[in-house]
Image (tube, rainbow, N blue to C red):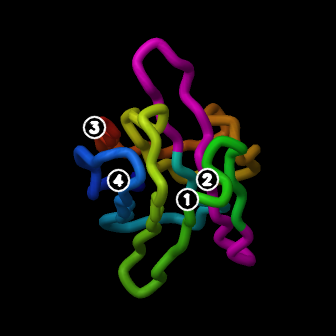
Amino acid sequence: QVPLVESGGGLVQPGGSLRLSCEASGFTPDYYAIGWFRQAPGKEREGVSCISSGDGATAYGDSVRGRFTISRDNTNNTVYLRMNSLKPEDTAVYYCAAAGGVYVPSKSQTYDYWGQGTQVTVSS
């Protein structure tokens, strides 16, 4: 019901930057939060960041805090993830997700709607 489309991934060198976008297209019901998750080969899906719809509060995973910034633009229903000082260990498929009810920021199973992901590769 809430299609999410990620964009902005690509190949960057260590220390570089990317901005990911997550757009909710079509009709969207009320949601509690938009989160970013990532999954690298052989790794479990990891919570990266989220932003609440109510007060705009944000949360970050320990591995990205201070380097990544989540923001939203309500005029175009888009949430952004600005990624600075990228490291090879940031390489993953990045997914955006919407929580339609009570959620735990870092728990992917508490999010209801998912995009198909965008690949981020950090390599020299």
* Disc on the earlier residue, 3 or 1: 1
Residue 49 tag number: 2
Q: Nearer the viewer, mark 3 or mark 2?
A: 3
* Disc on the earlier residue, 4 or 3: 4
* Residue on which disc 1 sits: 68
* Span of residues in magenta: 37-57
Mark 2 touches mark 1? (CB < 8 Å): yes
Q: Nearer the viewer, mark 3 or mark 1?
A: 3
Picture quadrant of residue 120: top left
Q: Residue at x 61, y 49 (%)?
A: 64
Q: Is residue 3 left or right of residue 57?
A: left
* Residue on which disc 3 sits: 124
Q: Residue at x 28, y 48 (%)?
A: 12
Q: Amino acid at mark 4?
A: Pro
* Residue on which disc 4 sits: 3
Residue 11 tag number: none
Q: How many marks?
A: 4
